[in-house]
Amino acid sequence: MTENSEIQTLRAPLDVLAVMAHPDDAELLCGGTLIKSARQAHRVGVIDLTAGEMGSSGSAAIRGKEADHAAEIMGLVERRCLGLPDANLENNRESRHLLIEHLRTLRPRTVITHWPVGRHPDHRIAAELVRDACFLSALTKLDIEGEPFRPIKLVYATAFREDAFPADFVVDITDHVDRKLEAISAYSSQFDGATKGGEILPGGERPLTEQIRMQLAHYGSLIRVPYGEPFRISEALEVEDLTKLSVSTF
Ligand SMILES: [Zn+2]
């Protein structure tokens, strides 16, 4: 590979980018889909809006190392932490412009973020912030570095949000569920011995990873496969050929 083509590769746009509030949110909400996308030879990245420094256990430094390890497990080509204030995330000019700078550099085709209703206020605000930044990023008169750019698709990850049902689509992650759980387990400061975490409602004293696996099995059943991750979108899905529609009605 010549030096030039190396630079081109490094500068190639991302195919899929998850923008989430805290380190570990991407793994919990759409880790299987990110792993699957990377295995499909897509360029996949994650932006953590905060370092998760307000979490009850661990620290920003520890969670940063865990996030790097999880990124390797998932096969990401890019992971960035924007360092916005944890537990005090705001959809304001400063945070929008910071995110737009990164969107203009990474140029993702598809962006995944939180469902706009959430237990953690940062999740709700992240959903709004990401949508607004994706839209505004294309405006030519903004005083922000980089070429104006807008992702084509914004997708909401709705795993563990009962209020977000029904899913508009489910990604089959059956071949990637073990690796997703491995990526989650990289956050040992958060999840070692845990029975609850993130948006996941506990199943009594059932270990968290087992609880996650059971919920993913439920989402899988929506498309008649062992494990899946659910998503919502704001637009209708296009169908070209009725005979190619999958998932049996009966
Ligand atoms: Zn979170």
Image (cartoon, helix red, strand yellow):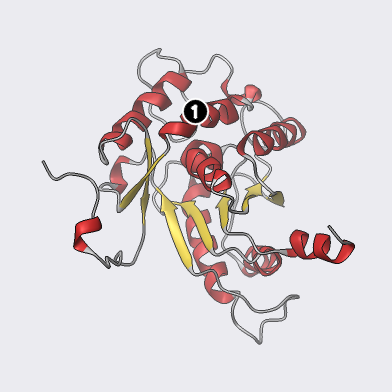
Is 155 positioned to the left or the right of 93 in the image?
Answer: left
Is 135 positioned to the left or the right of 228 in the image?
Answer: right
Along the line of sight, the residue nearer the viewer: 156 or 87:
156
Q: Which residue sits furthest left? A: 250
Q: Measuring from the top left, give residue 176's x and y in whole percent.
A: 49, 33
**Are there few (<14), some (14-19), or many (20+) residues within 10 Å of tag 1?**
some
Q: Is residue 29 above or below residue 134?
A: above
Q: In the picture, residue 222 is in which quadrant?
A: top left
Count every numbered label the image shows and give the total.
1
Instruction: Look at label 1 and name its amino acid.
Output: Gly
Q: Which residue is mark 1?
A: 197
- At a point 19% along the width and 62% down the height, the residue shown is 242
- At a point 47% along the width and 21% down the height, the residue shown is 209
Q: In the picture, residue 13 is in which quadrant?
A: bottom right
Along the line of sight, the residue nearer the viewer: 235 or 52:
235
Q: Measuring from the top left, give residue 47's x and y in whole percent.
A: 64, 51
Is 80 positioned to the left or the right of 247 in the image?
Answer: right
Would you say the beta carbon of the disc 1 residue lies within 8 angstroms of ligand 1? no
Q: Which residue sits furthest bottom? A: 141
Q: Is residue 144 above or below residue 29?
A: below
Q: Quadrant of the N terminus?
A: bottom right
- At a point 52% along the width and 69% down the height, the residue shown is 132
Q: Is residue 239 above or below residue 22?
A: below
Q: Measuring from the top left, give residue 96's x and y in whole percent.
A: 62, 66
- At a point 52% along the width and 39% down the height, the residue shown is 31
Q: Which residue sits furthest front? A: 1
As helix, strand or loop, the secondary structure at mark 1 comes to loop
Q: Is residue 203 above or below residue 171?
A: above
